[in-house]
Image (cartoon, rainbow, N blue to C red):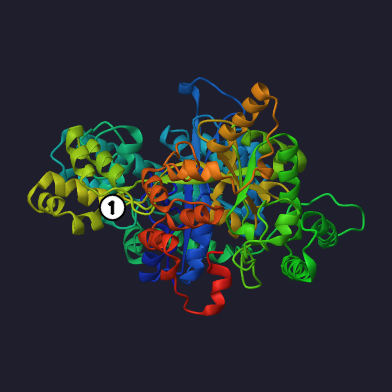
Amino acid sequence: MSKFVHLHVHTEYSLLDGLSNIPKLVSYVKENEMDAVAITDHGVMYGEIEFYKEALKQGIKPIVGMEGYITSGKLTERPARGQVKNNHILLLAKNLEGYRNLMKISSIAHLDGYYYRPRMDRELLKKYSKGIICTSACPMGEVGQALLNDSYKEAKEATSWYLDTFGDDYYLEIQRHEYEKWIDKSSNQEIKTYLTEMSDSEKKWNEGVVKLSRDLGIPLIATNDAHYIKPEDATAQDALVCIATGKTMNDTKRMRYIDAPTFYIRTPGEMEKLFPDTPDALENTVKISDKCNLEITLGKWYFPKFDLPEGVTADDELRKLARKLLSEKIPNAGEEGKKRLEYELDIICKKGYAPYFLIVRDIVHWANNQGIITNTRGSAAGSLVSYVLDITTVNPLKYYLPFERFLNPYRPSPPDIDFDVADDRRGDIIGYITKKYGKEKVAQICTFGRMLSRGAVRDVARVLGLPYSVGDRISKMIPPPRQGFPVTIDKALEEVSELRTMYDTDSDTKKILDLAMQIEGSARHVSVHAAGVVVAPTAITDFSPVQKEPSGEKIITQYEMHASEDVGLIKFDILGIRNLSILGAAVDIVKDRLGVSVNLHSIPLDDKKTFEMLARGETMGVFQLASGGMTKYLVELKPNRIEDLMAMVALYRPGPISQIPEYIKRKHNPKLVKYLDTRMEKFLGMS
């Protein structure tokens, strides 16, 4: 049984102020025989679902939380920057109610309270206090600041308010980072002074907190303000902070992690040695862990409510529509087509996905009625139901496209329909969805920019105070991304002999690369997913905390794509494509100048002049055919039918690209074609 639980822990999602990778963090906790651990990133809940899943996977109890910012005034106030008084506060979810309240608090702090930081106020905290454990946090907490300002009365008043609000779920937090141990290890007087001041402040704060605890009968908890996993990670953590603040690591006038490398995941034994005089503060961390029993439902889907006539279910509506439209779209579908349609409908309805198809159809129809150029691509083209509903434009019966690649009885997640739209009208479509379902139920999805190998090298070289040319030269020796994935520094050292030689012989290069490898892959900033939009049946904040995008007004989830799907949000991929905007503009120009209305869906697919143009290599501006490599292959292929282009697009990607010359040979000499099974000639033959 663990004697101590870490309740104050920052991960990489305290962006550029935390180094801890979640799987490594949980593994380290398990290795050191701790039964539970908390996640408390700065003002956000980005990593909660990843953390929750990883902890359960490794047999560790996950305690979901956040170190937030509480303002002394109203969260809507915007005083001059020097007058802003924000204090830290630690919040942990005891149960599902507390978790949902935590999501509400974080969302409102971002949407209404954001002013340099996402802020809450006492009114908000009181409103959503149920199911939440609150602690007084670090010296930057409201209680800590009052004590450091020699106002025991103010600290006592603040403590009393929190006690009234949270009752026996309020705790006073103490920390000991042993600054005094490192004073004599530095030869720099400024650093010595800094460490002395930090040591004195921490001692004063701790003494005041312990007095408050004894005077008011409020339990203590001991924490270590962990920003990284092991002591040896302190330098990398310091580098991250310098990257975030634009400082260099030799700057002594800043918050420094390297001078007192104690902000890590201490073992229970280390914590016992740190707090021999307050064993109750250690025991209470376990008691808090015992109180926290959050269970988040994952893998269940919650579809938005689609308006239907009274008494009609989504299954009924989908079946009726699909059967009616089959005869209109494919008059000669016959028994084979009807059988295929019923087969697909049975799978769709049994898995509960009928609302999804009705919603997507409604979005596509609205976009088309507004004159927005759209296209649906990917495996959805294998669905006859999608085709008859006008979600897709390719007849799967004609091209023998399998439904099972898109959806089958064993697929654990909902179907994924990639909906491409003219990029200058994407906002209109999202606006329609928002108006139809309610702005509180719609959000775009966040994604994270990460410290990739080349960028990490440049950043590290800069914070080490080295000339730009040094980092730039080393970074350029790392090979460019392959198949969409960056080459890691480890891999580059294996493959690039010149880089390995520099690493082995040049101390600056070794220092840069060693440090860059430690921060490589860490989350650097949050941004907006290019396509993902989620729509919930109730408020989004019942499923995911939200915030505004960093550079604008878009509302985005704090959970990235996979986490959003894990909690049951239905994702719609609406991707803005520049080529579709150009295509729409071309249609408008033809109509204005020639008086001809072009219907993009009735353009013939066997136009001889078009194939001759492509065979001459005139591919500029043609989507997916314009690259130099593709143009070269088209000239060699001499395509004369749409199937040739389909094959080329399918082959021109990592892996099968090497087979293109073989395909071209067989195009010009069909005698070379051999079938492993003669029955496949029906599907793969040239006719």
Towards the viewer: 600 or 181: 600
Q: Residues within 10 Å of mark 1 (few under 14, many from 20)?
A: some
Whole-percent x, y for residue 458 in the image: 25, 39
Q: Is residue 567 visible?
A: no
As drawn, 240 above or below 71: below
Q: What residue is pinned by disc 1?
A: 518
Q: Which amino acid does the dot numbered 1 rest on?
A: Gln
Using residue 94 as the reference point, say whether residue 51 is left or right of it: left
As drawn, 104 above or below 372: below
Taking the view exactly as shown, the residue that stands out farthest to the left is: 505
Towards the viewer: 264 or 330: 330
- Residue at 53% from the left image edge and 68% from the top image edge: 684
Whole-percent x, y for residue 419 in the image: 62, 47
Using residue 357 as the reference point, say whether residue 678 is left or right of it: left
Q: Is residue 562 visible?
A: yes
Quarter of the rendering occupied by the N terminus: bottom left
Towards the viewer: 147 or 558: 558
Quarter of the rendering containing residue 17: top left
Whole-percent x, y for residue 357 in the image: 73, 55
SS for dot 1: helix
Whole-percent x, y for residue 126 in the image: 66, 43
As drawn, 319 above or below 167: below
Using residue 391 as the reference point, say whether residue 88 is left or right of it: left
Q: How many marks?
A: 1
Quarter of the rendering containing residue 374: top right
Taking the view exactly as shown, the residue that stands out farthest to the top is: 80
- Residue at 48% from the left image edge and 61% from the top image edge: 285
Towards the viewer: 278 or 492: 492
Using residue 438 as the reference point, say whether residue 300 is left or right of it: left
Quarter of the rendering occupied by the C terminus: bottom right
Quarter of the rendering containing residue 148: top left
